[in-house]
Amino acid sequence: MSSQPQRHEKGAVRYVEKRRTGTCAFADRIARASLESYRQNVPDSHRDRGSESFQCVAAILAHFPPDGREGGANGDGLGTLQVVAMGAGTKFLAEGVLREEERLARHAEDGNERQEPRTRYGLRVRDCHAEVLARRAFRWHVSKVILSDVLGWNFVDCSYRPILERWPAKEKGRIRYGLKPGVTLHFYSSSAPCGNATLKKFQTMRKERFDDKLDEDSWPMRSHQEINAHSIHMGQFALLLKRDSSIKEVENKGERAKRQKISMHKGKPWPAQESDDWCPPGTTIPKSNCGSVHSCSDKIARWNYLGLQGALLSPLLESPVYLSTVTIGRKMTESIGRRAICCRLEIKKRTRKKKIDALKSEDATCTIAQPYKIKHPAVMGTSVYMDEDGTLDMAKHAGIGQDVRFDSNLCWAYGAGMEDADCIDGKSGFLSTAEPEDDTRASIGKPSRVSTAALTDLYVDILRAAQDEAGTGNSGAPQILDEGCPFSMEALRALKRKQSPEYESAKRRLLKDHWIFGEWCSRESMN
């Protein structure tokens, strides 16, 4: 007899995705375009694996307002909506693999022998969750567009509308770009991002209502209300890590019980920093020593402050690029989503005598490096499902909430302009040659185009091309062009500080001075 009794009636079935209401027509349009890109770029053999082997999909889209062209951009007078980048995946590298990569990179730098490709830092994609892959693919796309423009190449076909335009250079040998007028960026995730966005506590949750006053080119513009910070010690705004199941807890049971007893106060749960028992499934707290890769909620919040472009692309762009909306499918709750991806950045820490403002969103202050600011995108739900008609036979499931499995190690990254999406082994971080009947075979050991190493190479190519275009040679080139690409994490950090001091300053203030995000698990500080 099973130790866990069956909690579903015999013959019970349910939809793969819970029936839900979308926010507006634009949100549903975002979801349809994103899922269509997923179906076009991920082979059928890897998508049709049965409803119980689920997948998460994310995408970054560009919206062009109606421009009055004949017939309209879509033949119906609507603005153009196109997918710039797409990611699909649910895996990340084990802590042992991450540490080994860093060790080999340090060893290669310390020694005077010729460095082998396998020792270079950043060859593996560390985090293969869909949201992170979509953003990496976006950076790849922007890098390729800039490089192609400088070289005079036609990077994408005529059906694609470029999102960037070149701005006048402020100095010889330097280039800069910006989003075209009217272009806005939008994010889609088929499920609530892991971490704080799945912590269904501390907020008043209401069912979504469809706004039929908004057309297919419009989204809610209401400002985000300030969140009442009433449960900070319980983890209301806490940073969360992706729990590494390969790490075994070695703490003495007696010591753990003693710590739990001390942490209890008048029967209330333990403070958020003392235990991770309160965390959503698959996550843990930074002090648990059970992982070091931050949740997608934490990372999206960073993007809503620092922008999508990252450090290396920052000096090539006129200003940071931010999201205007975030659309979420499964497990979406608007108030929880706002808290997770932006509003907790602006929460004021209260003391008995004064309030301490960690960051400001608009006005210039000494606590924030301009032009970076907190961006509050519209958070929307969608009634469009990944699996429209799929149902689950619940008879073989022992407990409620255990019906969806993320079994596949295969992850996918696609940026507009790629002939084929990169198929990545989420357990190794390298490209995979997995066949349809077997997605667990070993990866081929080659880096993806969206890996840190590949994106750094693209940046170097852009600098070289810009200097050749201006006829400046290597007179203004950074040190990297003379010594070759950096192989260690330390060298890459140095490159970012040299090329993007403003971005690095803003990031440092966020991850050191902010009273919540100051607890960020930086890999630099872990070594």
Image (cartoon, rainbow, N blue to C red):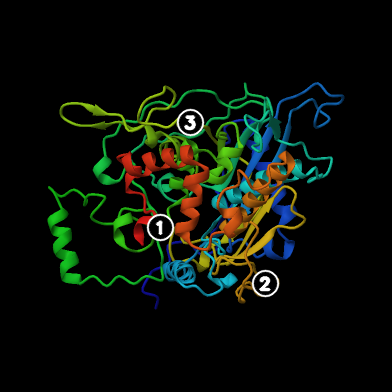
SS category of the residue bearing label 2: loop
Q: CA distance from mark 2 to mark 3?
A: 40 Å
Q: CA distance from mark 1 to mark 2?
A: 30 Å
User: What amino acid type should be assigned to the residue bearing mark 3?
Assistant: His
User: What amino acid type should be assigned to the residue bearing mark 2?
Assistant: Ala
Q: Residues within 10 Å of mark 3 (few under 14, many from 20)?
A: many
Question: In the figure, 107 relative to 358: above or below?
Answer: below
Q: Residue at x 64, y 73 (%)?
A: 444
Q: Give the residue furthest to the right.
A: 70
Q: Residue at x 47, y 32 (%)?
A: 372
Q: Position of residue 179 (x, y in %)?
A: 65, 31
* First in sequence: mark 1 vs mark 2: 2
Question: In the figure, 402 relative to 141: above or below?
Answer: below
SS category of the residue bearing label 3: loop
Give the residue at mark 2.
434
Q: Residue at x 20, y 26 (%)?
A: 354
Give the residue at mark 1.
523
Give the residue at mark 3.
376
Give the quadrant of residue 245: bottom left
